[in-house]
C-alpha cells in the first residue's frame, strides 16, 4: 500500500513561496527600483520624470484592459527588458544602478520606465 502524501516534500514553516510575477518584480526592484526611487524621492525633477513614465505604464495597461497588479506589471517589465536587449541596451544588475539623482537624469529611458514599474508595483502593494 502506497501513501500518496509521501510523494510530496514537506514545506518548512520558514519557506516563502513567491508568485513568479512578484519574484520578477522583486528582482527588478533590487536591480533598479531601490536606487532609482531613492534618487527620485531626493530630486523633485527626477521624481516628475519617473511619474511621467508611471503615467505611460498606467496608460499602456489601461489600453490593454489590464489591471495594475503584479502579473501585468511583471509582463510589462519583461517587454521593456526584451526591447532594451534587442536595442543592445542593458538593465543594471543589483547594486550596479546609479545612486546619484544627476546620473538618473541621463540614464536610458527603459531604465527609468522600469523604475516607474517598481513605483507602481509598490503603490499597488504588489511587492
Image (cartoon, helix red, strand yellow):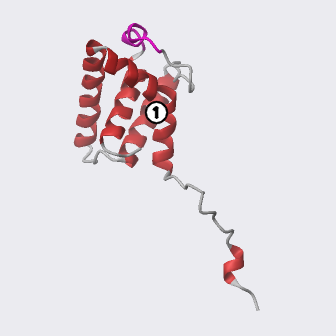
Q: In this view, does 104 lie above or below 85?
A: above
Query: Residue 42 versus residue 123: which sits nearer the camera?
Result: 42
Does residue 101 show up magenta in the picture? yes
Q: Residue at x 23, y 30 (%)?
A: 55
From the viewer's perspective, is residue 64 above or below residue 3?
above
Depth check, front residue: 108 or 123: 123
Determine if the magenta segment contains residue 83: no
* Relative side of 85 to 2, left or right: left
Q: In the orientation shown, which residue stands out farthest toward the front?
A: 14
**Residue 52 sits above or below residue 57 on the image:** above
Number of marks in the rendered image: 1
Residue 109 placement: quadrant: top left
User: Which residue is pictured at 42% across the width and 15% down the height?
Assistant: 108
Q: In this view, does 48 lie to the left or right of 77?
A: left
Image coordinates of residue 33 in percent, x first then y, are: 43, 28
Residue 35 screen position, x and y as percent: 45, 22
Label 1 neighbour load within 10 Å: few <14, some 14-19, many 20+: many
Residue holding disc 1: 29
Residue drawn at x 60%, y 57% is 15
Image coordinates of residue 1 in percent, x first then y, are 76, 92
* Residue farthest bottom in this picture: 1
Q: Can you say which quadrant of the picture contains the C terminus?
A: top left
To which quarter of the image does residue 76 belong? Answer: top left
Nearest to the observer: residue 13 or residue 94: 13
Where residue 10 appears, x then y in whole percent? 66, 68
Give the farthest residue toward the right: 1
- Helix or strand or loop: what does disc 1 sit on? helix
Image: magenta residue range: 99-107
In percent of the image, x 56 and y 23: which residue is there?
95
Amino acid at each position: 500500500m502506497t501513501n500518496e502524501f509521501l510523494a510530496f516534500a514537506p514545506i518548512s514553516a520558514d519557506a516563502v513561496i513567491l508568485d513568479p510575477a512578484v519574484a520578477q518584480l522583486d528582482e527588478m526592484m533590487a536591480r533598479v527600483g531601490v536606487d532609482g526611487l531613492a534618487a527620485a524621492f531626493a530630486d523633485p525633477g527626477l521624481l516628475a520624470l519617473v511619474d511621467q513614465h508611471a503615467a505611460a505604464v498606467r496608460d499602456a495597461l489601461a489600453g490593454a484592459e489590464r489591471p495594475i497588479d503584479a502579473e501585468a506589471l511583471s509582463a510589462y517589465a519583461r517587454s521593456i527588458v526584451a526591447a532594451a536587449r534587442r536595442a543592445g541596451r542593458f538593465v543594471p544588475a543589483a547594486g550596479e544602478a546609479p545612486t546619484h539623482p544627476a546620473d538618473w537624469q541621463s540614464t536610458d529611458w527603459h531604465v527609468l520606465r522600469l523604475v516607474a514599474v517598481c513605483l507602481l508595483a509598490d503603490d499597488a502593494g504588489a511587492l
